[in-house]
Amino acid sequence: MGAVEQSVAGLSALVGKGGVLVLSGAGISTESGIPDYRGRSGQKRNAQPMTYQTFTRDPVARRRYWARSHLGWRTIARAAPNAGHHAVGRLQARGLLTGIITQNVDGLHQAGGAGGVVELHGALDRVICLDCGELSGRDELDRRLATANAGYDAVAGGVNPDGDVDLTDEQAAGFVVVDCTDCGGMLKPDVVFFGESVPAPRVGECFELVERSASVLVLGSSLTVMSGRRFVVRAAKLGLPIAIVNQGPTRSDALASILVDAPLGTVLSKIAWDLR
């Protein structure tokens, strides 16, 4: 039995004990056609995420964001859950998980059969008005933007991890942004931008899940940013076993008792099969 097979066998035994908290990142969605932020090398890709400060203060940057996001949303909306998402849903259905925290905004865990998912950074399929707080569906906004931009024919480059695409400033210049239908306020995807804090109640819920769990399973996250890594650090302080399945190194490899560097869909499908 090779090293990877041994690690997968150890992971299967750990998950089989139950009480597992899943913390997932962009790497679990790459097999669905959504790129991650770093890839196997751990080096950050060229995509520059929008910051909250720039979005709210710079009308030109906000228009550019919505032009890119409008085109990219079609890729996210068409994405289907992969074998990894389905495996996590099956493990939850078998009562082996205490919860699922995802750093992703694509909704694919739920589409793969999971329930009660804590969306740490929000979700792209919702839109919030920053003035009145009204929440609405992204499909509704997509229809409004399509109507306001009839004839807009920019060709998108590759989709980025946060759901937007590559466009030049010239391509984005002719895009028309729409506002809240209730108050005329500024609309924003219901996601946590860089420079924006995760709501405190959501963070508290995640820490409570750590406290209630017997182990933590990290799936497809480099754990580079503290937003998700803090829960692994807490688990380590509590003495909980930590397992990481990721293609490439992570910032918390030293905290893990099990490390598996392999495609997530393959690994998770095998575990779900072993524990059927």
Image: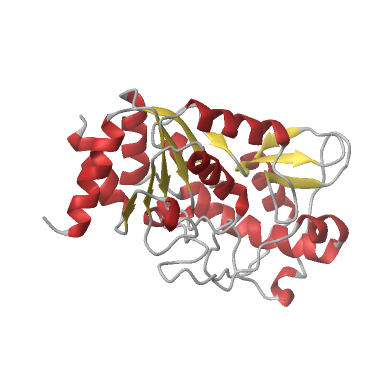
Vertical placement of residue 236 versus 68, above or below: above
- Front residue of this view, candidates 216 and 116: 216
Asked if 63 appears above or below 190 in the picture, the reply is below
In the rendered image, which quarter contains the N terminus? Answer: bottom left
Q: Where is residue 58 in the image (x, y as percent from the top left)?
A: 86, 63
Q: Which residue is drawn at 62% across and 49% down?
A: 227
Q: In this view, does 256 lie to the left or right of 183?
A: left
Question: Observer-nearest residue: 242 or 167?
Answer: 242
Q: Quadrant of residue 184?
A: top right
Instruction: From the viewer's perspective, tell me whether residue 204 is left or right of residue 55.
Output: left
Q: Where is residue 76 in the image (x, y as percent from the top left)?
A: 52, 51
Where in the figure is residue 222, as x and y percent of width and height? 48, 58
Q: Where is residue 46 in the image (x, y as percent from the top left)?
A: 58, 73
Residue 68, compared with residue 5, is above or below; it is below
Q: What's the residue at 40%, 67% (across, down)? A: 40
Colour scheme of the rendered structure: secondary structure
How many numbered markers are drawn?
0
Pick the front one: 4 or 157? 4
Image quadrant where one finds the C terminus: top left
The image quadrant of residue 60 is bottom right
Residue at the left extreme of this rendering: 1
Position of residue 96 in the picture relative to residue 34 (left or right): left
